Amino acid sequence: MIQLHFAPSTACMIPHILLEELGVPYQRVPVDKQNDGHKAPAYLKLNPNGLLPALTDGDLVLYETAAICLHLCDTHPQAGLLPALGTHERAHAYKWLMWLTNTLQATLIVYFYPERWMNEGNAAGLAELKARAQARVGPLLEQLDAELARHGGPWFLGAAYSALDPYVFTLCRWTRNFSSAPARERPHLGPYLRRMLERPAVQRMLGNEGLVPPYV
């Protein structure tokens, strides 16, 4: 049985949506992030980095969201959540997956957790780092918007829904409270996010995690 160790409104949303899209049996195992459950010894046995999510699949233990997504796609190829192996389309899917996790998500993490890079008590440094991270996110959202405009399809890779769509949706959601230019205000990302919200798997994820509007 697949188990997803998760906390609401985190990167766990990404494999959570994928699992709902796949329609396979799985269990959700809540981790009390507010009370440092992700730092508890039991959870650190799953992910020694103390980060969410973690996924177990039999005796397999996985962390790193992109790795979890690729595993779910590889073990459920009939779902067609990535283009065919060896194609240019597959290569571009890998490119965007790595960009989402290593570039956009990494920048958003700086915005939400600036204290990880600053000495304690450096309030001015924290504020500056947070502001610079938010400024950096803007051009990255423009790249996503431009890609949707380029191909004109309903989903991030074009005509077919893929494992990248939960990733794009989740990271765009994280900008919903930005003081300026959240993802939903972009001309192509806005309608795209509304399409994502119409998917039953996304609605089930939102309900499972107890999330309330505004969703994006």
Image (spheres, rainbow, N blue to C red):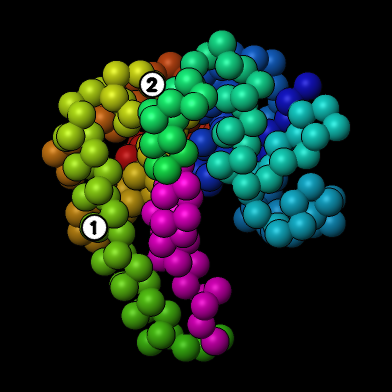
Identify which residue is drawn at 62% across, 24% down: 74
Q: Which mark is residue 139?
A: 1
Q: Main secondary structure of the magenta part?
A: helix
Instruction: Locate the N terminus and report the quarter of the image it occupies.
Output: top right
The answer to whether 13 is drawn above or below residue 37 in the figure is above
Residue 29's x, y, as percent?
Answer: 72, 35
> What is the C-alpha distance between the residues marked 2 and 1?
24 Å
Task: Give left or right: position of 18 versus 100.
Answer: right
Q: Secondary structure at mark 1?
A: helix
The answer to whether 204 is drawn above or below residue 60 in the figure is above
Residue on which the image places disc 2: 161
Q: Amino acid at mark 2?
A: Tyr
The answer to whether 50 is drawn above or below residue 143 in the figure is below
Residue 105: in magenta span: yes
Task: Give left or right: position of 179 versus 202.
Answer: left
Query: Badge 1 local density, few (<14 within 10 Å), some, or many (20+)?
Result: few
Identify which residue is drawn at 39% across, 54% down: 104
Tell which of 117 and 153 is nearer to you. Answer: 153
Identify which residue is drawn at 18% across, 26% down: 152
Q: Which mark is residue 93?
A: none
Question: Which residues are drawn in magenta?
Answer: 97-119
Residue 137: in magenta span: no
Task: Give left or right: position of 24 versus 126.
Answer: right
Residue at the outermost left position: 187
